[in-house]
Amino acid sequence: MLDHLPDRSGAIDLVRLIAVTAIVAGHCFTKEVTQDWLYTWHVAVFFILAGYLWRPRRPVHVEVEKRAMSLGRPYVAGFLVLTAALLLVKPAGALEKIAGGIEGGRFAHMPYVTLWFVSALFFTAVAFRVVERVPYAAQWGIALAAAVAGWIWTEPLSHTPLGIGYVATCLIYLLIGDALRRLRTRIRRPLLWGALAFVIGVVLVVTGAAAPLDIKLGDYGTPVFSLLASSAISIGLILVAESVVHPGRFSRACTLLALPLLAVVLLHPLVLWLDVSPWIRFAIGMLVPLAIGLIALPTRAAPWITGQHTVRRAI
């Protein structure tokens, strides 16, 4: 299958793998262990990547259609799988939880705890597609104003159906990713600058200048500094990965493993019901959904389970 993969950056896919691994670890281990080191960047990096990989001047209706295919279908399929598991394993009080899952965003509790991320990414991408029609300076003005609104009106914005209010906080991350895209060709020593950005972000976290984020709960950390820390760590990961991952089998392997990662994001919360050690939960939460996604890739179920087009097997 490695020879029939879509033409994607293995470096970016490695960043995706690292981030999803951090998301699963953040759920499987206690928050006291993972919050400081993972929560600052492990979700924010996906919004920065969306801006970094942005294709300008796409019509808004096309953006909606593409995001509905890549995010909407797995969202629906994941919701149905999670609901079936809920009814089988935890039927007591299931209807209330299902209602919360339908409402989405912060209202979605176990096992729907990661649905907010998918819907927030959808709405933020569509919002950015609208915003990109105004002058560049105005785009930043809108994003900064939205970020300030996110810090001021945390509660009402984080309690919106399908998490649409998260756009206020997440939009600026797409602008940051887009700015990196615009500047990328001018960065002559990406490994050095990437390592420096990463260290700056870590120092902000270690010194306590930047409190950890929990976007779903409307906890955006320390104004300005947490945004800087999450952005610096994310940019550092991107630049370092692009410096060390070169075309070849490792790059293609990263892409193969990254293609079904949306299935991991959506399905791994089910392992939190297991009464086993955190390390076993973590291993199962990563490997089982990943295997399901890899098995689905060559089938017609791929768009629904992974959000990706079907990948042909080698003949």
Image (cartoon, grey):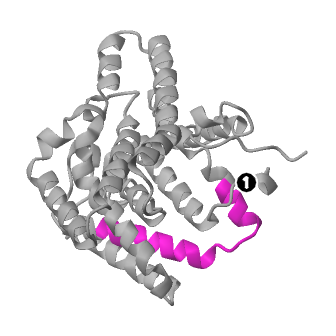
Residue lying farthest to the left in this orientation: 152
Residue lying farthest to the bottom in this orientation: 188
Q: Which residue is mark 1?
A: 5
Residue 93: x and y in percent read 32, 11
Residue 100 belongs to magenta span = no
Q: Residues within 10 Å of mark 1 (few under 14, many from 20)?
A: some
> Is residue 33 shown to the viewer in this render?
no
Of the pair 41 and 34, the residue shown nearer to us: 41
> Is residue 215 shown to the viewer in this render?
yes
Residue lying farthest to the right in this orientation: 315
In the image, the segment drawn in magenta is 229-255
Question: Residue at 41% of width from left, 74% of height from top?
Answer: 180
**Image position of 177 with respect to 265: above or below:** below
**Image position of 118 with respect to 131: above or below:** above
Predominant SS along the magenta part: helix
Residue 251 belongs to magenta span = yes
Question: Residue at 20% of width from left, 58% of height from top?
Answer: 221
Residue 5: x and y in percent read 73, 54
Question: Residue at 18% of width from left, 58% of height from top?
Answer: 147
Question: Residue at 32% of width from left, 65% of height from top?
Answer: 175
Secondary element under disc 1, as helix, strand or loop, is loop
Residue 199: x and y in percent read 38, 78
Amino acid type shown at disc 1: Leu
> Where is the C terminus found, in terms of image quarters?
top right
